[in-house]
Amino acid sequence: MNDTIAAIATPYGSGGIGVIRISGPAAFDIAATLFSRTRNGLRPAGPFETHTVCHGYIFEPAEQSVIDEVLLIPMKGPRSYTAEDVIEIQAHSGTVVLRKILDEILNQGARLSEPGEFTKRAFLNGRIDLTQAEAVADIINAKSVNALRFAASQNLGSLKEKICKMRGDLIRFLSRVEVNIDFPEDVEPFEPAETEKNQIHDLIKDCRAFIKQHDDACFLKDGIRVAICGAPNVGKSSLMNRLLDQDRSIVTAVPGTTRDPIEEGMNMNGIPFVLSDTAGIHQTDDLVEIIGIEKAKDHISQADIILFMKEAGSQVTDAEFEKVVYRNLPRKERKETINGQKVIFVVNKIDIDGENLPQLSSKYRDVPRVLISALKNKGIGRLKEKIINISMAGLDVGKSSVIPNLRHKKALELTVESLEAVAKGLEDGMEPEILAMDIKSSIDSLGTITGETASLDILDTIFSNFCIGK
Ligand SMILES: Nc1nc2c(ncn2[C@@H]2O[C@H](COP(=O)(O)OP(=O)(O)OP(=O)(O)O)[C@@H](O)[C@H]2O)c(=O)[nH]1
Ligand SMILES: [Mg+2]
């Protein structure tokens, strides 16, 4: 933490501008020895006025030659990204020029930063909490506008505020319990007020709501998995290409064309999806097809939404639906998947026969049916709408401002566990000493979310996922 770090902060390759970042106590001195306001010889330029833009030249000191014409932005800590003294140099973006400038900065005593080290310093210096640091990575990796919106809100501290408030309530409650442990003769014996019991129940409810929010909305980050399945030749690959609006899967009139599942990402209404086109499921002796069918079944079992396809003019039986879809779903999710309308019965090729349309039996009356022609581009808009509606069902993306990630969710589950012990303890009139232990562990697990009580392991895992220069 006491040394000065530097890194190229923009992606490698040719581009308009490349940024090099320096952070630490020697940042201003290092910049002053390499930067000159005139091109006629290196005349050290400091002291810099903070938060201004300086035009000038970066020199190679040994040769006294100009490496590049640059803009330099000095930012005195704590008003900077890391809360330390920071210099950002905007140079021309090319691998060689940026590398050369960075080498000169390292020659002056800076150290090459580790992945995420600038953000880690911002966290360790108390400028941001851990949820905000994680949101930085989420902003960079956002695959959709919605994912970006949640990440941006978390970056501004929406999750931090909520967790800090819950933790604050528990800390106040703990201090009241601890007074009884430390000074039992000076105060009345501990008797929890009704409001305190209610407060613990409310906190459990809040944690559970966050956990649900994760379960409902984590797909906004990773993408909703949509599997297209059915018998050979029904038009699965044609639909895949139609939804993607590109020729991704091979389409032929020969049944059994698709073997390996084909996956492709796409974005609809700001929601990321991962579509997979799978091999036609049927009875076969062809070894390659058999392997493809096994893979298709894997995709069906892992999908969030399943498009079960049949052709117009054909019949469908419960047995076929069960073989292709129902029996491939994880046992405990079968009912919920069908009732939650996560399977759509897609009838394709309605251009050939618009009269004889297959219909599932009343046993599967909850499965919605959508009629399309992948070839003639009919009904595709309605199918997309249906997929989007299913994805958003029960999720109020508009109102909520936070989506806890998996790490937060696990910490919240631990918090619920300890808070339930606290609630039970309050009912049973448990000793204040034992009550205090359970309250403390709930405070600790909430603290791992914001970083107050996060171990070094957690920090290393989080920041090693960042790129160098962030
Ligand atoms: N008339 C008509 N033909 C279609 C339609 N959709 C697909 N086809 C044709 O049906 C044949 C099979 O299409 P594919 O998309 O390869 O079908 P598939 O389900 O991927 O087939 P496999 O990969 O072999 O399982 C091709 O000749 C397509 O042109 C449609 O809506 N109407
Ligand atoms: Mg195919």
Image (cartoon, rainbow, N blue to C red):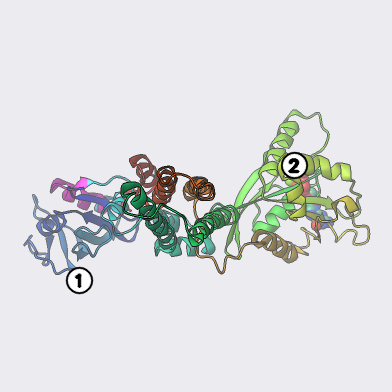
Is residue 265 shown left or right of residue 7?
Answer: right
Residue 440 point in image, percent of width and height: 40, 47
**SS of the residue under disc 1:** loop
Q: Main secondary structure of the magenta part?
A: helix
Please state which amino acid type lies under the numbered disc 1.
Thr
Badge number at residue 257: 2
Judge whether residue 76 is colored magenta. no
Residue to which mark 1 is pinned: 52
Residue at 18%, 50% in the rendered image: 4
441 and 48: which is toward the camera: 441
Q: Nearer the viewer, mark 2 or mark 1?
A: 1
Q: Amino acid at mark 2?
A: Thr
Q: Residues within 10 Å of mark 1 (few under 14, many from 20)?
A: few
Q: CA distance from mark 2 to mark 1?
A: 62 Å
Residue in the foreground of this view, choosing between 281 and 365: 365
Magenta segment boundaries in residue numbering = 98-111
Query: Which quarter of the picture shows residue 312?
Result: bottom right
Q: Is residue 309 above or below residue 290?
A: below
Any part of residue 354 in sight: yes
Q: Position of residue 286 (x, y in %)?
A: 78, 30
Residue drawn at point x = 38 percent, y = 48 percent: 466
Question: In this rendering, does residue 235 appear at all?
Answer: no
- Point out residue 389 in the picture as x, y percentages from the top left corner: 69, 63
Residue 189 appears left or right of 33: right
Q: Tell me where residue 22 sits by quadrant.
A: bottom left
60 versus 49 height, above or below: above
Q: Is ligand 1 less than 8 Å from the beta carbon at label 2?
A: yes
Residue sitting at x 41%, y 50%: 443
Q: Residue furthest bottom?
A: 52
Residue in view at x 66 percent, y 53 percent: 247
